[in-house]
Amino acid sequence: MTDPLFDDVQTLLDKEKGDERILKQILRACENNEVISNYERNYVKNLAEKYLGRLPENIDPSAEEKPPIPDVIVPTTSLQQNIEIPTSMAPQIIQKKPKNPKMLIGVGVAILTIIIIIGVSQSGTSIMESDNSKIDTDSSSATLSIQTDLSSYQKGDIISISGKSNTSETINISIENQNGQLVWSEQVSVKEDGRFSTLAIAGGPGWDQSGTFTLKVENNMETKSKTFSFKV
């Protein structure tokens, strides 16, 4: 089902109402299924009430939560594989009953050797695949990280924030100005694949001077930060 917010943003852009840059940033977030903060939703809601004749309505905070992504069950490869001996081989040996018992022993030893070679080969392949899978899993387990879509912003720009954290269901994101003053913060939920994203607007209290701002992310294990330039 299409998000009504997406339709309202498109209609406002068509009618050239509101800040075109902010509306395009929100439209991009809707198309990429990124998290849209309450600030952006209220911005679109106020424009829709003013220019599109939308009636004011109470928004249930729980309605903004996205449905959880179902767990993906990855089938695991068993390290042990049953080696089945064709049943047609045994009756042939019993029914023939060679007169020379040494020949019977030689045939049995040859069959047993072939079975052992096949079993070792298949078992070794399974172990190698399991080890490779373990290595890939260990290498893909990323630590806490955060990034922005740009390295420099001006007043009124929308900052697209994204990253990855596999150690917590929620993380805290904040922005401090060049004086160490907290100018923005938000608690963001981490998706099933460990990724998170949100948007912030470069403006408001504490955004009145140009300088180097610091973006921080925290979970239960560690803290990471990234700087970006801001110009008034």
Image: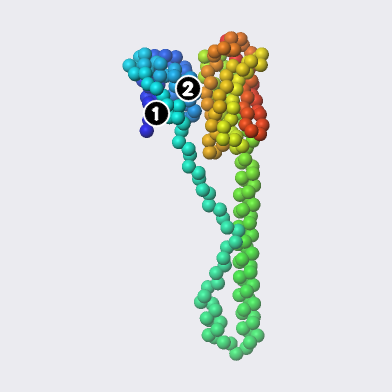
Q: Residue 135: x percent and y percent?
A: 64, 47
Q: Amino acid at mark 2?
A: Asn
Q: Residue 128: x percent and y percent?
A: 63, 55
Residue beneath the point at 64% across and 44% down = 138
Is residue 16 at all visible to an observer of this figure?
Answer: no
On residue 38, the disc is 2
- Reading the image, the residue beneath label 1 is 3
Residue beneath the point at 53% across and 38% down = 192
Does residue 187 sit above or below 120 in this rendering?
Answer: above
Q: Quadrant of the C terminus?
A: top right
Is residue 92 at all visible to an observer of this figure?
Answer: yes
Residue beneath the point at 62% across and 53% down = 130
Q: Quadrant of residue 188?
A: top right
Q: Residue 227: x percent and y percent?
A: 64, 21
Q: Quadrant of residue 159?
A: top right
Q: Nearer the viewer, residue 118 or 35?
A: 35
Q: Work out which residue is located at the far bottom of the displayed protein and give it.
A: 99
Q: Nearer the viewer, residue 23 or 124?
A: 23
Does residue 99 sit above or below 106 in this rendering?
Answer: below
> Left or right: 196 with respect to 138?
left
* Alpha-carbon span between mark 2 and mark 1: 15 Å
Q: Earlier in the sequence, mark 2 or mark 1?
A: 1
Colour theme: rainbow
Crowding near the residue tagged with mark 1, few <14, some 14–19, many ≥20 C-alpha atoms within 10 Å: few
Q: Residue 204: x percent and y percent?
A: 54, 13
Kindly state the secondary structure of the residue where label 2 is placed: helix
> Left or right: 26 with respect to 183?
left
> Left or right: 77 with respect to 27?
right
Crowding near the residue tagged with mark 2, few <14, some 14–19, many ≥20 C-alpha atoms within 10 Å: few
